[in-house]
Image (tube, rainbow, N blue to C red):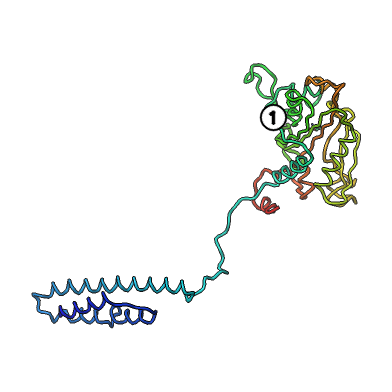
Amino acid sequence: MLDKVRDLQQQIEHYTITSPEQLEQFRMRFISRKGVITELFEQLKLVPPADRRAVGLELNALKNAAQTQFEQFSQLMDEQQTMTGTAPPIDLTLPTLPNLTGTQHPLSLVRQRIIQIFERIGFNVADGPEIESDWYNFGALNFPDNHPARDMQDTFFVEKAAYGGTDMLLRTHTSNVQIRLMERQSPPIRSIMPGRVYRNETISARAHCLFHQVEGIYIDRNVGFKDLKDTLYHFVKELFEPGTQIRFRPSYFPFTEPSAEIDISCQICGGKGCNICKHSGWVEIAGSGMVDPQVIANCGIDPEEYTGFAFGMGIERITQLKYVVNDLRLYTENDVRFLRQFEGL
Ligand code: PHE
């Protein structure tokens, strides 16, 4: 019996296979329940009891050796099949795991587009504080003391005590950055300032206490109203659908003179009249004007030598017109069904 076991051990050790058929032969002969090793286990009871234990141990070792050899052969065959291309092909149509990457927020997309348009015509991007003093948000911009914007109802004021008794507030527009730029820099100044602004409004479909603006300023020698018009015509042409009409409507801002609001033909109805444009065919997109000489002087620049224009627009508003977003609250609710619609834009 022991001779038989050792003989089989030799066989297994020196076995070679070159094909899947031979692998199967090996399995049938050494591994399967009808194979030689199972047969030997059955014969174990015929071995004299004194030798049975020793033979049993050898037999177990033989069984393990056969198993190890079989696994190595199987692996060898798999590798060979992969290399020769005879393995079953990979199923490229199997569904993959869902790819859960985020999407860009529509306000970010529109902000980036606005920045891109202005950067290409020589504007750079400037930034400034959101918690601001009364002077930079109102005073330097010619807001009279009794202007309604300075009312608690329209502006969020910050506890005076926290700022050593100075009147501080959450900026109501990004015009504060225009003042800071003009103070710091000598002309030419050609910048846009995107950023968050705050107004004390009750949150509804049409108003929010937090929104985003992009304002712009250009100060140099001989800057005129024509430059303002050229710049904003170009901007509208770049951002909106071809054929969009633009008009300047006289308006008033304390810091510009003359001032104009800019309307474009309604993107939703094409000017025929709908709910968005309140049946007028026009929608307002921005405020603008020639910077008041007093504001320029407030920043230490000589208004006799330098003139300039400024404009400001709300990013939410532009996004609403471009993508027909009819409720401002959608921008901050983070509902993925809303956000996913802007994927890949
Ligand atoms: N600051 C104005 C606003 O927030 C917009 C504006 C900017 C108007 C520059 C004219 C010139 O409404």
Q: Position of residue 345 (x, y in %)?
A: 71, 52
Instruction: Judge left or right: residue 21 versus residue 149.
Output: left
Residue 226 picture quarter: top right
Residue positioned 72% across, 29% down in the render: 171
Tally of numbered discs: 1
Q: Position of residue 243 (x, y in %)?
A: 88, 51
Instruction: Judge left or right: residue 64 versus residue 88.
Output: left
Neighbour class for label 1 at 10 Å: few (<14), some, many (≥20)?
A: some
Closest to the observer: 256 or 180? 180
Residue positioned 88% across, 29% down in the render: 222
* As drawn, 50 above or below 169: below
Farthest residue toward the left?
50
Instruction: Judge left or right: residue 287 versus residue 9.
Output: right
Q: Position of residue 199 (x, y in %)?
A: 73, 32
Closest to the observer: 78 or 216? 78
Closest to the observer: 187 or 34? 187
Judging by the rendered image, the residue that carries numbered circle 1 is 128
Secondary structure of residue under mark 1: loop
Q: Quadrant of the N terminus?
A: bottom left
Residue 32 picture quarter: bottom left
Q: Quadrant of ligand 1?
A: top right
Asked whether mark 1 lies closer than 8 Å to ligand 1, one says no
Q: Position of residue 305 (x, y in %)?
A: 86, 23
Residue 31 picture quarter: bottom left
Farthest residue toward the top?
165
Closest to the observer: 39 or 228? 228
Instruction: Judge left or right: residue 11 versus residue 128.
Output: left
Q: Amino acid at mark 1?
A: Gly
